[in-house]
Image: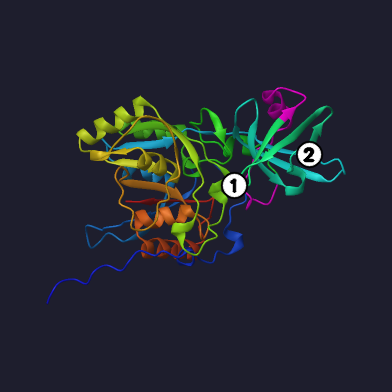
Amino acid sequence: MTGDAPPPPPPRRVSDFDYELPPELIAQTPSAERGASRLLLVRRDPRLPAEPELEDRDFEDLLGLIPAGDLLVVNTTRVRHARLVGTRPSGGPAEVLLIHPAADDTWIAIGKPGSALRPGKRIALGPGVSVETLEVLPGGERRVRLLGAEPEEVLRRFGRLPLPPYITREPEPEDDTRYQTVYAEREGSVAAPTAGLHFTPALLAALESRGVGVARLDLEVGPGTFRPVETEDIAAHPMHPERYEIPEAAAGQIERTRAAGGRLWAVGTTVVRSLESAALPGGLVRPGSATTRLLITPGYRFQVVDRLVTNFHLPRSTLLMLVSAFAGHARTLAAYRHAIGRRYRFYSYGDAMVVL
């Protein structure tokens, strides 16, 4: 009997997505200039012997990598200044992170310490302004109410930018612009769609002038993006819900791009999850608003996304699993080893990777 051996089964253990990262490679600040990042090019299927599988480039090289007629899809969510720091009645510190508004002028939130967010407890933010916990939800989140001022006023006066937990410093004025994409629109996220942080208005304009389309959608990035997978069997991981909206205009751009034979480039894992959650036959998408709990792991068959621009992600994370599903598990880990060896910067303020 002849023929190729069947491919190995896709990895199903969280330990298969682990790697060791020197702490000094975790970017604590943005690059000196927006767009001045490195770019690791990963080819899934090199067509010529001279084409390496991995290639060190600069982010601005995307201008020569995306051909006319292709469509770049970006996430226009804006990070809300949703981190509230206050004091308990005992005088001890406490912290609340507002995730999204809920019914009856309340908010869904998380915080620490947990003892400060029991039902009936209040955290003082300033004179006459506090956060009251109303109930503990099944997933551990809290439903809270802001007291003493309108929510917009509370966020304006007391809200801080919620930098990721691996950035070990307090936010600075520069973060107000650098931890937002240049195309950010509606507030709703607790974390930035970080692959988009590299794009400048000049690069976007240059791409469009060369015939590359740009479509916009909105996915509200939640705190679950930083939550580790705690089950060894990744299929048992309860994926966090995130709300997204694909406008009619974006769905129309995708349809026209498909009809003309163009490819779709997703800028970030949030765009991938939105597009694949709304997938229709033929690589099209369903417009509208919905909530996704889609967990993409190796073995997933992509229906919409052809190319991926992304950052380097945490070990054992659902984001790394998604990239591994797109680029291939072994190839992704090889790319990460290459990036570590070449001293790339990692995570939200780090360098980028493009998978062709």
Residue beneath the point at 33% across and 58% down: 299
Whole-percent x, y for residue 186 in the image: 52, 28
Q: Residue at x 47, y 52 (%)?
A: 319
Could you classify mark 1 by the number of other residues whose Cα lies within 10 Å: few (under 14), some (14-19), or many (20 or more)?
few
Say if 332 sits above or below 159 in the image. below
**Residue 10, position as x, y percentages in the image:** 35, 64
Q: Which amino acid does label 2 sit on?
A: Lys
Q: Name the residue type under label 1.
A: Gly
Closest to the observer: 202 or 285? 285
Which quadrant of the structure image shows residue 142?
top right
Magenta stretch, residue numbers: 146-169
Quarter of the picture holding the N terminus: bottom left
Residue at x-position 47% and y-position 44%: 195
**Is 171 displayed left or right of 192 in the figure?**
right
Q: Which residue in the structure is indicated by mark 1?
A: 139
Residue at disc 2, secondary structure: loop
User: What is the secondary structure assignment of the residue under circle 1?
Assistant: loop
Decide which of tag 1 and tag 2 comes sooner along the chain.
Answer: 2
Residue extending farthest left? 1
Residue 113 at least partly seen: no
User: In the drawing, what numbered circle is on residue 121?
Assistant: 2
**Colouring rule applied to residues:** rainbow
81 is higher (above) or lower (below) than 60: above
Residue 305 visible in this rendered orientation of the protein: yes
Q: How crowded is mark 2: few (under 14 residues within 10 Å), some or many (20 or more)?
A: some
Between 152 and 341, the one nearer to me in the picture:
152
- Image coordinates of residue 54 in percent, x first then y, are 36, 60
Q: Measuring 53% from the left and 48% from the top, which residue is drawn there?
A: 225
Q: Which of 26 and 158 is in front in this view?
A: 158
In the image, taking residue 139 as reference, residue 74 lies left or right, namely: left
Query: Is residue 152 one of those drawn in magenta?
Result: yes
Q: What percent of the width, then of the height, locates residue 309?
A: 40, 46
